[in-house]
Amino acid sequence: MTAAAHVGPDPAAPRRRAALAVRTGLAGTSELTRLAFRRDRIALPAGVYVITALVAGTAYTFRRLYPTPAARAALAAAGGTNPALRFLYGRLDGDSLGSLTTWRYGIWAGIFAALMTVFIVIRHTRTDEEAGRLELVGSAAVGRQAALAAALLTAAVPSVAVAGLLCLVLPLVHLPAAGSAALALSIGCCGLAFAGIAAVAAQLSASARAARGIALGALGVAFVLRGVGDSDPHTGAAGPSWLSWASPLAWIQLVRPFASARWWVLAFPLAIFAAGTALAFGLAARRDLDAGLLPDRPGRATASAFLHGPFGLAWRLQRGALLGWAVGYAFTFAATGAAAKGVGQLLGTSSALEREIARLGGGQAAITNAYLSAIMLLAGLVAAAYAVSVILRLRTEETQDRAEPVLATATSRVRWALSHVAVAVAGAALLLAVAGVAAGLGYGLRAGSAGSQVARMLGAAMGQLPSALALAAVAVLVFGVLPRACVASAWTAVGLVVVLFLFGQVLKLSHWVLDISPFTHAPRLPGGTVSAAPLLWLCLAALAFSAAGLAGLRRRDIG
């Protein structure tokens, strides 16, 4: 029989193709991508919705509050000359509705998109590797680079979805289609840029926490560079500072979506995404599994006396994150406090806001107090989120089998849990104190009364502590009673409170719905009155929820 008679389908071809794919490192990428989308099926749509709603809602609000060109021109003049507002929101490229929308939420939408992609990439690469899941998956016919490719694809889809939805939604609120597309693409490209940065960070560090720290540190540096560059008084007419051009966040506004758009600026974030992706794949091919490229810092030969108990261990685990939160609080609330000096002039540019303030019987002092009260409420909400994250670290320690060695000693379950609860309480109080002092200094230095304003704002910030602790106590309760659902339940509670804070009054919800949020009962300081009864009830609720959670922890299985 000739060789031609044997020509036909080769039964070994599929196996050879699979082996070739494994050698190229991308086998199983589609399967891991589908798994990642399934794991993030709630978080991804929620993130896309929040970013889209914030930008579109801002455009709608500006159109309602500043319906005339004269009102928008007055707002642009007031906001563009305030250095604190320029630090927070960036530069203004005009007084059109689109330019004001880009100024108010363009950079912050980019920050939210960057946070979304950073957490997605780290979760599906370094977190899974640290937990041992990638080693288990890698034992099958899955390539070495598949997890990284799947993570980047999973992060790219919501960035593209945000851009696509904004392109469709912004014209519905009467923004020009071309400018809407430029703004939407710049926000989506910002998310892609930080996805590339997060991919590199995942290869550098051996722990997910450190990788997130590297990526979020890069985001913080980008914000500071842009803020310093945009608030520089010497670059007003000369154009943006070189510091602004060095920040990926500033590129959103440097595109100038609604004022002679510079489409070529979009090449910068796309180049960062491409370079970060290529570098991450190159680094992943050169390191060992479950290892980072940065050398681990050697520890001390013997533990300090502070680590002889669970409280010292909990503090050791959380101190780095708390330091990062505190630095972020100091910068953010110093800038927002400084912006209070001109907030009366800014809000006075809207006739609708003037009528509402007059109805409430307030003047410039009332406007300033309302603004400062709002930012202190925001400080309380973020401090509550920090406290929840600290308490949920208990579940991480439990599921990764690090709790058992601690509980194998003379440490009881309640004492182990209380160590993290104590760090959460102390950390939330510290963050609120930092927010109050920073806002007081920022406003007081501009108003000429730093000493009195610091004391005033410190009291206003600490008035939010009972509400923050009540929300954190919900995390203690679900950790003790519903451990498998504690992460989702706790963050759902935080999300519900944030939704009530943002949209409760706008949607005109009934008071009993608004009362679900513990922050509804917090004092509105400065300028408001303090009632002891709501604060006492909030503290009692926090104690009751925590006690119930600790009781449940004593009775359930560990692991």
Image (spheres, rainbow, N blue to C red):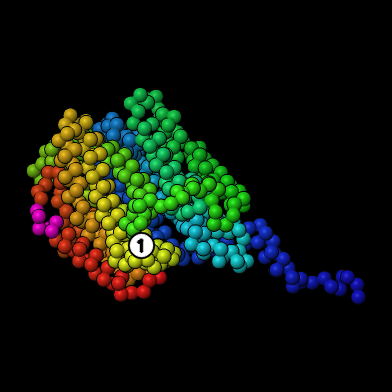
Total numbered labels: 1
Spot occupied by residue 392 in the image (x, y as percentages of width and height): 34, 61
- Horizontal side of 39 relative to 6 (left or right) equals left
Quadrant assignment, res 183: top left
Q: In screen coordinates, is 43 left or right of 285?
A: left
**Which one is in front, 77 or 13?**
13
**Depth check, front residue: 149 or 105:** 149
**Where residue 51 sits: x, y (%)?**
37, 52
Residue 117 in sight from this viewpoint: no
Is residue 242 shown above or below 269? above
What's under tag 1, amino acid-wise? Leu
Q: What is the residue that sits farthest to the right in this orientation?
A: 1
Where in the figure is residue 344, as x and y percent of width and height? Answer: 18, 36
Q: Quadrant of the N terminus?
A: bottom right
Query: Considering the numbered disc 1 on the image, is that residue within a helix, a strand or a loop?
Result: helix
Residue 479 part of the magenta segment: no
Could you classify mark 1 by the number of other residues whose Cα lies within 10 Å: few (under 14), some (14-19), or many (20 or more)? many
What residue did someone put label 1 on? Answer: 394
Query: Residue 297 appears at what percent x and percent y?
Result: 48, 47
Which residues, given as a range, are shown in magenta? 531-536
Residue at image position (35%, 52%) is 305
- Residue 302: tell me if it is visible: yes
Q: Quadrant of the C terminus?
A: bottom left
**What is the chief secondary structure element of the magenta stretch?**
helix
Q: Is residue 7 left or right of residue 481?
A: right
Return the residue nearer the eye: 516 or 70: 516
